[in-house]
Image (cartoon, coloured by chain):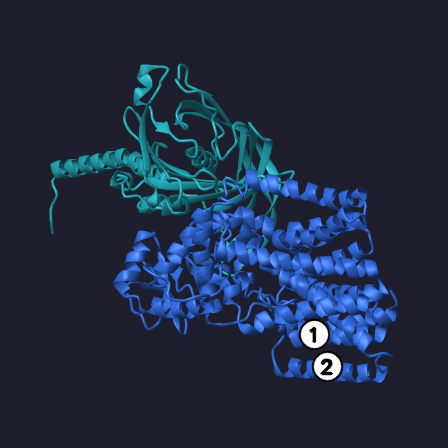
Amino acid sequence: MKIKTFLKYFVLTTLFLMIGGYRYGTGDHVSQLPTVIHFFNPFLYSTDFAHQMIFPWYVKSGLFICLAWFSRLTSIPLEYIFFAVYCLVLYLYIAWTDELLSLLGTRKSVRNLALLLLLPYSYLFSSISHFHLVTLRLVPYFFVLPFCIKAINIFLSDRYLAASIITGMVFYIHQQLGLILFGTLAFPLFLEVVRSHASLKDLSRLFIPFLFLFSVHFACMQLFGNYKNYPWLDPDWGGQLLQMVRFRVPHHLLLSYSGIVEKTSFFLILVITILAVSISLKTYDEKTARRISYMTAGLVLACIAGFIFTELIPLPIAFSLYLFRSDVLLRVIGFASCALLLDRMVGSGINPLVIRMLFIITAFAGLSVCILKDNIRIFIPKNELVSVSKCIKENTPISAFIMASPYHKGLRLYSERSVFVSWKSHGLFFPPNVAKEWFHRMRLLCKMERNIVCQGTPCRKICQENFESLSNERLLDIADSYGIDYLLVNKTRTLPYKKVCEGNQLILYRLK
Amino acid sequence: MILISSQQKIFVVKLLVILCLILIVIIPPSRAFNKKNEKHWLPEWKQLILEGEKPLTRFLVRLRIEDESSLLPYPLREIGRDEFKSFGSSKNILLLSAETVTMSLVLPQEKYEHFVWFRAEDMKAIQRVRWKKSGNKWLKLYRWKDKGVFRLTLKPRKGREDALGPGKWTKHYSSFYEYQLENPKEAEKIVSEPLCLIYQVMRLAHQGLKSKVSMLVFGKKTMHTVTVSFKKKKVIKIRFNEDSSNGFISKMKKTAVFVYKICARPVAGTKHHETFSLVGLNHNIEIFVEPKSGIITRIRGDNDVVGHVDLRLVSVVKRR
């Protein structure tokens, strides 16, 4: 790679980082990092019902555990390692998106402009699955996204074996996206074999390595992990899952929950892709045009299947596959198609001066955001919950079992203690007994035992309000029936028990 | 001025002699009292973590010792059976617990926790709780009686109970294991529990005893005769984290340890065949202990499934 190209990606990564931002120890990390802590100290979380999820989570958190091992071996704090890997992944995302644009025949000047436009597109544009292309934290999904793009690039270059191995690697880090990626690559090749455009040998090169890796994982999970006795096709369990999904994550799984903006975005991307493929790409490279159109068709079919088998005929397997996530790869292909259309629209290319000006404006915006806003947070933020959690960690035994408002994000991570239930760390994709128990506990604390009065994010707020309105008697009754020994409540609530930790707003009582 | 007759003088002298004799008689019992205090001996640590490794597998053991026998650990306080919540009036009762975890990158995690209440002076076991926390979970409560051991097993029913704590499990079974003794005269003997051997070894080392001690130990279902014998004194290098008021500090030092060997054999004529087990180790068990502090620096031995396991000290929480 030329030094100039390297510098271009480096500058873009810095701009993405400055404007987009970075976070650690918040959001999804609060449910994923406890598994890393537990891996190194398995005596923790012994009274946490969520500890039953630990084995399957090890598989899912393999990436984090590897990073934590590296941190232990090198004595570099985990926060720095996460940040470095995040920057690297962001760099690869930009570089491999550029490679995809190049493969589709987009000229360099248009590519440079497209990479600048990728910035708002990645952070602001979320379609029906409600996942942004770039997340603010290093999570398995974002880690594998550049590799998905790379696998598509390699596939378009007819290197099926390498594409298959990368897909397998993606699958081990993020099962749903790995399967969606495999479907995205397998579907066009399969159609090409049917239409005699490709050979069976090509198909076997793509299928065999991935299916081998998949079988090993599936067999292990079926024998020892959370796939054991999982009712993949049980419509009754599917119906119950649908009720839980409506309560907790409808934005990721249900089309009916998406608003008009998300649905329009989805169809817009689809239309642009079809236009770009049929008008621009077909005349330039018929084979790539055919593949891109098959891929698009495959991804749309997956989304349709997602709608049918989650909302109309709810099947657990469809929930586990998260088929709406196909929309993420469709957005990547859609972006490449947009760039291609733009390339064909500006006949003689874009004046480099315009691009330089845009670079300067973006850099200025990036600097301003960086100065005005604390946008890159490498460490766990200091707030009330974090400081109270620190006190809990120092003043309670490791077997302490705490009940708090499910609204609090990160009590399990920051205090390293077992927590009764939390909104963030749901167990919907774990064995039915764990998922049902999570839902039951949520309904107890949210005062929704009889009926659920909300859907999705508003439920969180209602839960918080209902938890605060629970009487002391009811709260202690629930605590007693589950063997809770510590209660973390707002200071407005006074209980006749010993105070262990006290913050500005929160107070921890010892019940036993 | 008070005048003392010669007869009175003789009486005073006799009184003094008698007093001296009484004092001489009293001194040994007071020493015995000190010795009794010795029986209350507790090591300097409150919690130890030992860790061992095999390819792709980690073994962790967390030992805890408490002198508050009234302390009810988590699963026990949730069980609605009061007969398992009282331990008599003796102040000499200690609670020793061991949590063992086997972690593999391929197989699911195995996790057991084990609590024993016992009399410090003679190692007589009073009660034990064994809790399987992983896979098909169960909780077994054992109560030592005059003629044998009573056991209550708790299991979750399939479905929702599996995700709940042991207090909510509704499948209960009880059984009674009569002591099988080689010699009926042994019926009066003290029956201990495998985990008490850890305390026995620490105390022997603390007293500087290099002798051999035999005990009757009730395992899972069977009685074993166990011999704890001094093997050697050794200077070893240890590296561990110590929990202090300033947080965890890393320590590395050379220390002299006593090595004790544990040999167990089932009592002849026992109904159930059972392999002896101490923190997951079955044969050739050796315990390395620092005499002064009672810190167990190493436990090694053979496991029937994975072979030789060497558990080394990684963390100490000292008694404050």
Q: Nearer the viewer, residue A281 or A84?
A: A281
Label 1 environment density (alpha carbons within 10 Å; few <14, some 14–19, many ≥20): many
- Count of numbered badges drawn on the protein: 2
Residue B316 can be seen, yes or no? no
Relative to A368, does residue B218 appear above or below in the rendering? above
Which mark is first along the chain, 2 or 1? Answer: 1
Q: Which residue is drawn at 37% across and 39% down?
A: B157
Instruction: Please name the residue that numbered disc 2 is placed on.
Output: A362
Q: In the rendered image of this protein, which colour is used for chain B? A: cyan
Instruction: Between residue A431 and residue B198, name the one nearer to us.
Output: A431
Q: Nearer the viewer, mark 1 or mark 2?
A: 1
Of all chains in the rendering, the one displayed in blue is A
The percent coordinates of residue A447 (x first, y second) are 33, 63
What residue is at 53 percent from the left and 54 percent from the top?
A309
Report the quarter where the C terminus of chain A lies: bottom left
Q: Which residue lies furthest to the front in this view?
A: A195
Looking at the picture, how far across and down is residue B278, in whole percent?
Answer: 48, 32
- SS for tag 2? helix
Q: Mark 1 points at which residue?
A: A119
**Left or right of A106 on screen, residue B119:** left
Kindly indicate whether the residue at mark 2 contacts the one at mark 1 (C-beta within 8 angstroms).
yes
Q: Taking A501 as reference, is B31 above or below it? A: above
The chain identifier of the residue carrying mark 1 reads A
Relative side of B283 to B146, left or right: right
| Tag 2: amino acid | Thr
Q: Quadrant of the N terminus of chain A?
A: bottom right
- Quarter of image, res A27: bottom right
Nearer-the-camera pick, A229 or A7 = A229
In the rendering, at what x and y percent does residue B57 appear?
Answer: 61, 40
Say what amino acid the circle numbered 1 marks: Leu
Q: Of helix, strand and loop, which one carries label 1? A: helix
